[in-house]
Amino acid sequence: MMHSILRTACMLAVTAAVGLGGGLARADDYPVRPIRMLVPAPAGGGTDVLARILAEGLTRELGQPIIIDNRGGASGMIAADIVLQSPPDGYTLFMVYSGVLTANQAIFPKISYDPIRDFTPIANFADVPNLLIVHPDFPVKSVADLIALAKAKPNGVMYASSGNGVSNHLAMALFEQMAGISMVHVPYKGGAPAMMNLMGGQIQLMFNNMVEVIPQIKNGRVRAIAIATADRSPLMPDLPTVSESGLPGYSISLWYGVVGPRGMQPDVIVKLNEAIRRVQANPETREKLAKLGATPVSQTQGDFAMMIRNEVRKWSDVVKKANIRPD
């Protein structure tokens, strides 16, 4: 009887230790409950749209709901801080756009995280082109027209961004630097509110990703004058690149991927990476991404980690040259 009691007590103690000790997930039984995905942007923006496409696919692949948690603002740092404070058990994921990990450290001297040290790279998901778009009444038809107008009226043109230091701000800062012009930057808390003011005429132009832009181009609420990538998009073959239409050599791209808190179990990372790559390979997912102008990017966890390191170095140089400072 005593041995039975002791054996039962030991089993309860082990169970409690697993439950209270952080309970790092293992791939053989992961996941056993819903997974939260932090999105560093408001609902309705490009990051949110892509996150929901991924979440739908992952729910199918992993057999557990992926719950989207939109936490926009502070150039993605609000969401990043929540992820940093979460246990590395695989039940908190972070859908990032490139600037959150690659430019913020250079822009914000008091940033609370190190993009390399404090996050676990899991998988890249998609690349999305930025388009240079204007309000339909703005009197420019090309990049050359915009440069000429901005030179004639220094600081007389206002452009929007999704936040200070995010991809579309960096895109325009690089544009200004290469063109030798100066415009007024108006940052918003996400792409959706920035688009609202552009469509309302309060702002004249912006770079924004194709995910958010295509529906508004189709309904005539904005007009595209160029694409920021090195090559034209098959989705909009008649739209010239910035480089070919007035600013030779200009090129910038935007990527979206998934990371988690530091310290995740290697086998869980592999399971998530493989699940994301299966989502990317799914014809339904690829069709949804293509309609948005997005291209799936399938990488191993190691390749994704290396890309982040390279991008941190690249954008650190761009930020310094553009003299971008926090608000």
Image (tube, rainbow, N blue to C red):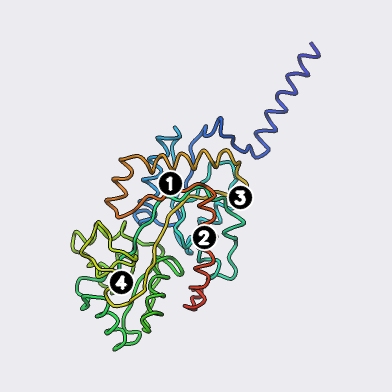
Q: Name the residue beneath numbered marker 2.
A: 101
The first of marks 1 and 3 along the sequence is 1
Tell me where residue 164 appears, x and y as whole percent.
45, 70
Q: Name the residue beneath numbered marker 3.
A: 262
Q: Please state which amino acid type lies under the numbered disc 2.
A: Leu
287 lies above or below 153: above
Q: CA distance from mark 2 to mark 4?
A: 25 Å
Disc 2 on helix, strand or loop? helix
Q: Please state which amino acid type lies under the numbered disc 1.
A: Ile
For disc 3, the neighbor class at 10 Å (few under 14, some 14 to 19, many from 20) is some
Q: Which numbered circle lies on residue 68? A: 1
Q: In the rendered structure, are the residues bearing label 3 and label 2 in contact, judged by CB atoms less than 8 Å apart?
A: no
Location of residue 72 by image quarter: bottom left
Instruction: Name the front one of labels 2 and 1.
Output: 2
Q: Please state which amino acid type lies under the numbered disc 4.
A: Val
The first of marks 2 and 4 along the sequence is 2
Q: CA distance from mark 1 to mark 3?
A: 20 Å
For disc 2, the neighbor class at 10 Å (few under 14, some 14 to 19, many from 20) is many
Q: Name the residue beneath numbered marker 4.
A: 242
240 lies above or below 43: below
Q: CA distance from mark 3 to mark 4?
A: 38 Å
Q: Please state which amino acid type lies under the numbered disc 3.
A: Arg
Location of residue 250 by image quarter: bottom left
Tell me where residue 85 appears, x and y as whole percent.
60, 51
The first of marks 3 and 4 along the sequence is 4
